[in-house]
Image (tube, grey):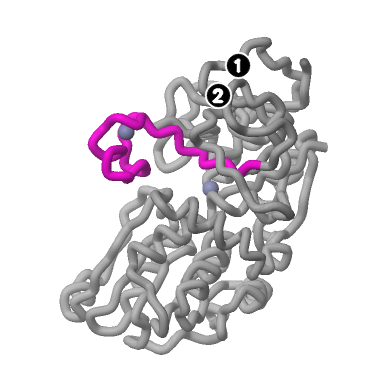
Amino acid sequence: MTYVKSLLTAARTIEIEEASMRDTIEDGWVRLRLATASICGTDMHYFRHFANAGFYLDHPVSLGHEACAYVEAPNGSDFAPGQLVAINPVIECGVCECCATGDINMCATKRFPGSATTRPHIDGFFRQYFDFPARCLRRVAEGVKPEHLTFAEPLACAMHSVNRAGIGSGDRVLVTGCGPMGLLAVVGAVAKGAEVEVTDLKAEAIAAAQTVGAKSGYVIGAAAPPTASYDVVIEASGSPHAYNYALDAVRKQGRIGILSLIQPSPVPINLHLNALKEVTVVGSILFTKEFDEAVALIEAGTVDFDAITAGRFPVSEAQAACELMASGEAVGKVLIVPA
Ligand SMILES: [Zn+2]
Ligand SMILES: [Zn+2]
């Protein structure tokens, strides 16, 4: 069986090839047909630099780790052919100490599609067909739209940060940066009952945050959030300087959640504010139990994911989709569909 596959072969170069599926499917894996995928900030780093956070790709790879799919061949699992499933892209080892406590994001030998952190690399989901372990797939309620379900993985990442920062009902929260991750942090914090404000360089991005529950926002350069007044600041801009703004905005004994993967570069930090205000800083990477939490929130149908979707492209136009994301013009997620 042949299918259309996008392959990142060098920085800013995606080639489209006609690939063929192997006849056999690995034991415990299921053959899937892409329903909808979405582009992550991580994919953008690989697209721009053929590397992310200091990890270089050894060879061409299909990008994409955010997707949902239809079951093509259950291969002995209890999934039904044609069934829509959410995909948790973390293939944890299942036997280490971290996996035993459910901290699959800390598993040292986990495998992750479309990433240089897994060697040899596993192709990601920006292709029409792929195989994936049955244990990573989740059944979903009838009627869930694939273009919403693809948000499960990034929403889980955002919700992990929200949970790690201990956001609860009535908390005053500031989210810095309204890229896709910031927008999903707003979704997660609002779902916990927090009162959320945002910052961004673009008024359109702040407007998008308001469609998913942010109360108000500040366009950087034109207005600034009040100092020392937020219970929690979630940093989602990826700009190293945003950390100093977060230190200003957070209240005494407040919390800062680092959601964006700030690229490794030295930055001067106003460390004294960490001490003087007794700020608790919590990092977060990927997710643990939040994948199921995210799927449940999507199934509930209360979030307007369409309002934070910037466009959709077929697999064969993955290059154009990545160029749109790279341009910085898109507000929200860019989706990839089979054709
Ligand atoms: Zn992602
Ligand atoms: Zn493990």
Residue in front for this viewpoint, 285 or 91? 91
Where 12 falls versus 9 (above or below)?
Answer: below
- Type of amino acid under label 1: Ile
Where 74 falls versus 339 (above or below)?
Answer: above
Where 294 falls versus 49 (above or below)?
Answer: below
Residue 330: quarter of image: bottom right
> Percent from the top left, x then y, of residue 145?
73, 54
Q: Secondary structure at mark 2?
A: strand
Is residue 108 on the magenta stretch?
Answer: yes
Q: Are marks 1 and 2 in contact (CB under 8 Å)?
A: yes
Rendered residue at 34%/29% (across/down) = 109
Rendered residue at 58%/72% (across/down) = 201
**Residue 238's mark?**
none
Residue 206: quarter of image: bottom right
Q: Secondary structure at mark 1?
A: loop
Q: Which residue is mark 1?
A: 25
Residue in front for this viewpoint, 199 or 231? 231
Q: CA distance from mark 1 to mark 2?
A: 6 Å
**The magenta stretch spans which residues?**
85-109
Rendered residue at 59%/22% (across/down) = 76
- Beta carbon of the mark 2 residue lies under 8 A of ligand 2: no
Quarter holding ligand 2: top left
**If the image is split into quadrants, where does the N terminus sit?**
top right
Q: Which residue is mark 2?
A: 29
> Percent from the top left, x then y, of residue 210?
62, 78
